């Protein structure tokens, strides 16, 4: 058991660190110890937020990036899961496609991004495409490998009971892949955001990636920090949301933990 | 009830074929327990996979309930060596799995599963997951799962190897009782001579690969014992143990004889 005093010290410690950072940058920038080119004070970042928000651009940029990320995550995960589950069932197809998929997985996404811009244009479609692409592999790889190493004793037991292929798929193959789906979702949620932002970096007219790149180009440091902070908040929220799905996907692993 | 008639099985290997079983014949009537014993790797488990339909014999046939085995027979239930309880299903959901596969109504199968759980001392663990159960209780749950399908023939593949001595005796007794009272045929594969003599009416000794039936021993006294734990204390036990040991022809020096 962790004692109450221990918990209180940890919480107070965290608050203290935050206060030191906020106060330190505020005073440092205000009194000229930190250069305005490289650092921004919390109040400056807040004014940048007010300005961007008032102009109506910020809400739009955030909305676009969030939309690209979520759609990329959902579509990429579903596709990765479907292919990862079904391919090992079809032995010959699995052996034919495996090297191609591994090569595609090996290509860095930053290199693939310009191709997606070329195919799908400057709008959000190309960003969703890039996001789907990397999320697909984040989901496909763990699900595929776990499906290949499926415990034969489970399927044998089901077969002896007289189960057909479909019943084995739904009662054994699917649930035994769920821990890998959960893993894929955790990795994928981070990559979905990276995919969307990379797409916006390569070529775009809107989105948080575009806002950050534009701020960097115009030496608008407070807006640059604002973009980073918003992305961080979004990334953390997304990862909390995915964590919360654990008890749904792998309920048996959470059953006896209290 | 269960009969192997001139059964041979050859693994179709990539480079060379591996002959596992050659011309194996023996029978197991209802209300009878037959133990199959043999050197490790001789094909004991393969024998069971021919009866449960996971593999087909290269020659000969396995008969269950007067019919040649083709695919899975409803008369047959199997208890595997390792735990086959699905980790993502609660204990009661595992026990009703076979009935679910057969398409039995949810209410009916749940009732049957709960009744079996009470009968085998698993009451109170319905909503638990298998990993929360001890090894002995997992075995009981697997047994209940198999019995829920009301098989007439039970196949057991070294099912008690991982259990501690006390738990083992209790479950062995349960299994013997299930077989006797339910007029079921039971085939148990084991490498444990004492277990074979204690539980079975007949012990089939297989030779090294390609395995043939080397000798069949009738054990007339195991049926009279109140508990399987009493059998090793009976006067005839040592004689049979020695005879079966000799038939197994296990070289104690290990590497000495030609494999």
Image (cartoon, grey):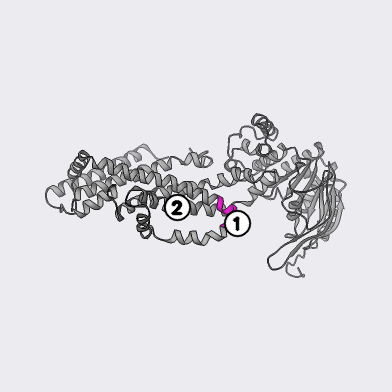
- Residue B149, by quadrant, is top right
Q: Can residue A241 be seen in this view?
A: yes
Q: Work out whether disc 1 and disc 2 sit on a shared chain.
A: yes
Give the crowd class for mark 1: few <14, some 14-19, many >=20 residues within 10 Å: few
Pointer 1 chain: A
Q: Is mark 1 on a helix, strand or loop?
A: helix
Q: Position of residue B41 (x, y in %)?
A: 72, 60
Pointer 2 chain: A
| Foreground label between 1 and 2 | 1
Q: Residue A219 carries which label?
A: none
Q: In this view, does A98 lie to the left or right of B117?
A: left
> What residue range appears in magenta?
A86-93
Q: Where is residue A97 in the image (x, y as percent from the top left)?
A: 53, 59
- Residue B73, by quadrant, is top right
Q: Position of residue B256 (x, y in %)?
A: 75, 70
Q: What element carries label 2?
A: helix
Queried whether the magenta region covers residue A145, the answer comes back as: no
Q: Which mark is residue A138?
A: 2
């Amino acid at each position: 058991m962790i004692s109450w005093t221990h918990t209180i010290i940890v919480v107070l410690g965290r608050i203290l660190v935050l206060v030191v950072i906020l106060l330190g940058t505020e005073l440092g920038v205000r009194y000229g110890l930190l250069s305005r080119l490289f650092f921004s004070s919390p109040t400056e970042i807040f004014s940048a937020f007010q300005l961007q928000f008032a102009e109506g651009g910020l809400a739009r940029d955030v909305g676009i990036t969030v939309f690209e990320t979520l759609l990329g995550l959902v579509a990429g995960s579903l596709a990765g899961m479907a292919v990862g589950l079904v391919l090992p069932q079809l032995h010959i197809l699995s052996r034919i496609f495996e090297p191609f998929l591994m090569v595609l997985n090996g290509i860095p996404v930053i290199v693939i991004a310009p191709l997606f811009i070329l195919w799908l244009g400057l709008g959000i479609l190309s960003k969703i495409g890039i996001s789907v692409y990397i999320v697909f592999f984040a989901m496909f790889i763990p699900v595929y490998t776990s499906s290949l190493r499926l415990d034969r004793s489970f399927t044998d037991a089901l077969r002896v009971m007289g189960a057909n292929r479909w019943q084995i798929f739904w009662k054994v193959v699917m649930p035994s892949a769920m821990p890998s789906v959960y893993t894929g979702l955790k990795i994928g949620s981070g990559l979905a955001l990276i995919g969307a932002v990379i797409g916006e970096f390569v070529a775009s007219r809107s989105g948080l990636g575009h806002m950050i790149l534009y701020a960097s180009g115009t030496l608008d440091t407070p807006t640059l920090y604002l973009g980073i902070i918003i992305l961080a908040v979004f990334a953390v929220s997304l990862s909390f949301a995915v964590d919360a799905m654990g008890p749904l996907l792998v309920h048996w692993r959470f059953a006896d933990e209290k | 009830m269960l009969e192997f008639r001139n059964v041979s099985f050859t693994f179709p290997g990539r480079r060379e074929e591996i002959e596992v079983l050659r011309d194996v014949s023996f029978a197991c009537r209802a209300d009878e327990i037959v133990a199959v014993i043999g050197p490790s790797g001789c094909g004991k488990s393969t024998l069971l996979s021919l009866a449960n339909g996971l593999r087909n014999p290269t020659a000969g046939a396995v008969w269950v309930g007067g019919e040649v085995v083709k695919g899975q027979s409803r008369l047959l239930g199997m208890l595997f060596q390792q735990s086959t309880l699905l980790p993502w299903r609660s204990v009661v959901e595992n026990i009703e799995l076979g009935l679910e596969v057969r398409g039995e109504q949810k209410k009916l199968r749940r009732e049957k599963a709960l009744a079996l759980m009470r009968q085998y001392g698993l009451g109170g663990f319905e909503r638990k997951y298998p990993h929360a159960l001890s090894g002995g209780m997992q075995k009981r749950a697997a047994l209940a799962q198999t019995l829920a399908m009301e098989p007439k023939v039970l196949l057991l593949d070294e099912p008690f190897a991982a259990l501690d001595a006390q738990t083992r005796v209790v479950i062995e007794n349960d299994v013997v009782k299930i077989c006797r009272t339910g007029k079921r045929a039971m085939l148990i594969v084991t490498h444990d001579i004492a277990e074979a003599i204690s539980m079975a009416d007949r012990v089939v000794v297989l030779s090294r690969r390609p395995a043939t039936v080397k000798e069949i021993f009738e054990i007339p006294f195991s049926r009279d014992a109140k508990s399987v734990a009493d059998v090793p204390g009976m006067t005839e036990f040592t004689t049979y143990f020695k005879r079966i040991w000799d038939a197994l022809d296990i070289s104690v020096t290990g590497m000495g004889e030609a494999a």
